Structures are given as structure tokens and as C-alpha cells.
């Protein structure tokens, strides 16, 4: 046997699994649940590169494999940056009605994830657009520019979009265009720009679409309650400029409120879940029926609601007695929703679990779902 043939056979024996084409690896990994990507990323540098590539997520979309994940942001004492976690189901675990709920036998958990380039600014709201979570800052009073940070949930990296100038020098539009919340003079504002989340760019809005006549607005403007002065939620009808109370006796907390489609859901501190169709003129709160098996929350509990793939997720905390009341346990429940008789919405508790132990002085910042 010639020397080259011996060398070739030797290489074949030392490499029993020849390299696969990269496009084939992408196709295979796109069919795997993203829950396993963290473990797969340590297999090799090639895997780690592919798992964060845009091509992989494009392939997942083409194959109809996008998944929805719940991202939770918490602040811990003496830590400058918030912690981010994802709701996971433990591998090889199934739910059964006979399963008894114990804090040490959870099927679900909040798993920490490393986040790169955390913004130092405080943000006032978080908006989910596909695989991005946009953190909108409210600090426009001190600056003529508005920052838009966004968390890329594919790479778990914070990025900063181009900054928006709130004013331009030209005065062709006679000051008839206004920016709500801006501290600049209205007569200096003659350009409105819209942010394109696909290209991460600001684009001018055509002049004919810039003018907003308050009286032409349809529906109502809902203003959430102020927790500091216990103001009730109110609604403004812009056509006739009349105010009305919304859900009297329902003192809502902004953290216990979320939207699923056109339906608003809230948790009333009195212990009731309510919903409201924001497309109707009445705007009345109705009770969410069902919810059998959902535990009662303590009056001190922090309660957060979030949309999760069309379902309602409820997160709440309670003290852990075994820790001497120095820790709290965060619990989570997933609730499917069903409309009945055209006038009722029923909730079915799919599961609830203890998902994370935290210090008692932690702060629950937010919970948002993203599709990746």
C-alpha cells in the first residue's frame, strides 16, 4: 500500500465524523429548540458562531420554528446592573394533573442569561417587536435627542440605535407640528420622524401625514392610575373633550397590567383579575372567570402580568419562612384564555411553579415576551 493511501486511511480513522457543510448544520440547529442553544454553544466555535448568526434565525422563520420566550428583568440590592432571566421548562419534564406542587420539584424555572452592553440610562417603558425589546427612555427634557436602546434577544446584546433630533431649523410648516413631551418651542418643530425597526433607521414622515387634529381621533385615550396619589384610571373622549372614570373601585397598579391583542388584563389588589376590550366604546372592566387552582396572593405580594404567546402569564412573590423571611420565592403561572358567549373570558391555569428564590429586597422591573 502506497504512503498516500496509508495517510488517507489514518486520517479517516482519527476523524470518524467528517465535517458537515455549514448550511446543513444551520438547517439542523434551526429545528432544535432554542432552550438547548446555551449547551450547544460550548460544543465548538463553529456552533457558537452559527447559533448567533442571522442566517440561523432566518432559517427558523422559513421553517416555521420561531419560539416565544418570556424575559424577566430584576434588580438586586448592591448591584449596578439589572439581572435578566428567561422562563425555561426543564428538559425531559412533563406536566400531569396528579403532580403535587412542591418548591423543590419545579418543572419550570427562571434561568439567568448573560447580557452584554447593558445601558446605563434608566428606561421608562419596554416594547417588544419580534426578536427585539426596545427600551424607550423618557429623558428628552434634558436633551434634544431621544435614545432608543434595544435588546437583541438572539445574541442577548444591548444595542443603541441612531439618535433622533427633535427639532429642525426650517419653518416651512408654521409650527403646526408638535412633539408631545418636548421641551423645545413648538414653532421650531417642523419635522416628524418614524423609527423603522427593520432597518434601525429614522425616516421623515410625509408633510401631509404630520398634522394631528385632536378632535379627529377615534375611540378614547386611557390614562393609567397614579400609585402615589391613588388616582383612579380615567379615559378622555377627544371628540367631545369629556373625562370619565374607568372601573371605579379598581385601583390598578401599572405593573399588574398587560395587553393581549385588543384586550387589556389587570390584577386588582383586592384579589380579582379583570379584562377590558379596548375596541369598544363602553370601556368597562369585567371579571376574568375560571382560574381554578390558582393560589391566592398575599397582600404584600408583587404581581406582574405579561403576554406569552397569546396566553397570560402571572408572576408573584411570597416570603420563604424557612429563610427567616429574608428571602422570597417568585412563582409563575401560565393561563390560557377562552372567549365564551361573546361577553365572557375564562382563564384556565395550565401550570404554576416556584421558579426563583430572591432576596426580600429585590425589585421586579418588568416581564416581556419576545419571538426568536
Image (spheres, rainbow, N blue to C red):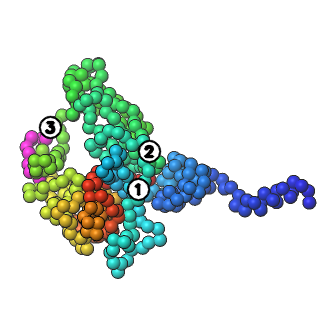
The numbered dot on residue 116 is 2
What range of the chain is rendered magenta? 238-246
Work out whether mark 2 precedes mark 3 in sequence or the reverse, and give the earlier one.
2
Quadrant where the N terminus is found in the figure: bottom right
Q: Earlier in the sequence, mark 3 or mark 1?
A: 1
Residue 157 relative to residue 298: left or right: right
Q: Which residue is mark 3?
A: 215
Marks 3, 1: nearer the viewer: 1
Q: Residue at x 45, y 56 (%)?
A: 66
Residue tagged by mark 1?
Answer: 112
Mark 2 crowdedness (10 Å alpha carbons): few <14, some 14-19, many ≥20: few
Q: Nearer the viewer, residue 78 or 302?
A: 78
Q: Quadrant of residue 11?
A: bottom right
Q: From the viewer's perspective, tell me whether residue 306 is left or right of residue 36.
A: left
Count of labels shown? 3
Q: Is residue 298 visible?
A: yes
Q: Position of residue 267 (x, y in %)?
A: 20, 60
- Residue in the image at 58% along x and 59% along y: 28
Above/below status of 50 relative to 138: below
Query: Is 30 on the left or on the right of 316, as rendered?
Result: right
In front: 241, or 118? 118
- Closer to the eye: label 2 or 3: 2
Tell me which residue sits at (19%, 65%) in the image. 298
In the rendered image, the vertical position of residue 348 relative to residue 141, given as above or below: below
> Is residue 258 on the magenta stretch?
no
Near mark 1 (Cα within 10 A), the count class, few <14, some 14-19 or many ≥20, is some
User: How far across and how far down the image is residue 135, in percent?
Assistant: 33, 43
Q: Secondary structure at mark 3?
A: helix
Q: What residue is shown at x 40% (from left), y 45% (from top)?
A: 151
**Which quadrant holds residue 258?**
bottom left
User: CA gap, disc 2 to disc 3?
Assistant: 45 Å
Amino acid at each position: 500500500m502506497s504512503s498516500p493511501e496509508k495517510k488517507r486511511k489514518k486520517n479517516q480513522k482519527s476523524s470518524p465524523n467528517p465535517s458537515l457543510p455549514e448550511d446543513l448544520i444551520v438547517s439542523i440547529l434551526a429545528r432544535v429548540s432554542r432552550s438547548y442553544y446555551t449547551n450547544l454553544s460550548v460544543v465548538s466555535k463553529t456552533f457558537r458562531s452559527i447559533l448567533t448568526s442571522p442566517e440561523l434565525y432566518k432559517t427558523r422563520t422559513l421553517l416555521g420554528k420561531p419560539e416565544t420566550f418570556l424575559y424577566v428583568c430584576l434588580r438586586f440590592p448592591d448591584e449596578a446592573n439589572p439581572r435578566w432571566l428567561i422562563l425555561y421548562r426543564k428538559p425531559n419534564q412533563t406536566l400531569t394533573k396528579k403532580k403535587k406542587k412542591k418548591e423543590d420539584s419545579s418543572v419550570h424555572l427562571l434561568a439567568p442569561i448573560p447580557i452584554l452592553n447593558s445601558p446605563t440610562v434608566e428606561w421608562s417603558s419596554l416594547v417588544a417587536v419580534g426578536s427585539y425589546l426596545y427600551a424607550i427612555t423618557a429623558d428628552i427634557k434634558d436633551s434634544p435627542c431621544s435614545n432608543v436602546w434595544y435588546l437583541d434577544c438572539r445574541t442577548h446584546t444591548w444595542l443603541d440605535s441612531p439618535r433622533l433630533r427633535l427639532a429642525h431649523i426650517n419653518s416651512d410648516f408654521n409650527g403646526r407640528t408638535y412633539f408631545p413631551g418636548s421641551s423645545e418651542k413648538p414653532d421650531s418643530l417642523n419635522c416628524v420622524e418614524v423609527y423603522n425597526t427593520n432597518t434601525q433607521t429614522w425616516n421623515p414622515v410625509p408633510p401631509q401625514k404630520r398634522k394631528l387634529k385632536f378632535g379627529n381621533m377615534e375611540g378614547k385615550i386611557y390614562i393609567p392610575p397614579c400609585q402615589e396619589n391613588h388616582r383612579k384610571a380615567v379615559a378622555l373622549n377627544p371628540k367631545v373633550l369629556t373625562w370619565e372614570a374607568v372601573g371605579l373601585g379598581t385601583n390598578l397598579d401599572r405593573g399588574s397590567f398587560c395587553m393581549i391583542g385588543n384586550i387589556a388584563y389587570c390584577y386588582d389588589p383586592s384579589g380579582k383579575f379583570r379584562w377590558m376590550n379596548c375596541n369598544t366604546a363602553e370601556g368597562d372592566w369585567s371579571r376574568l372567570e375560571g382560574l381554578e387552582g390558582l393560589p391566592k396572593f398575599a397582600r404584600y405580594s408583587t404581581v406582574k402580568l405579561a403576554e406569552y404567546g397569546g396566553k397570560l402569564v402571572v408572576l408573584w412573590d411570597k416570603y420563604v419562612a424557612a429563610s427567616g423571611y429574608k428571602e422570597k420565592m417568585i412563582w409563575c403561572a401560565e393561563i390560557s384564555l377562552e372567549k365564551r358567549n361573546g361577553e365572557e373570558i375564562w382563564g384556565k391555569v395550565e401550570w404554576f411553579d416556584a421558579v426563583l428564590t430572591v432576596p426580600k429586597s429585590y425589585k421586579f422591573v418588568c416581564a416581556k415576551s419576545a419571538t426568536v
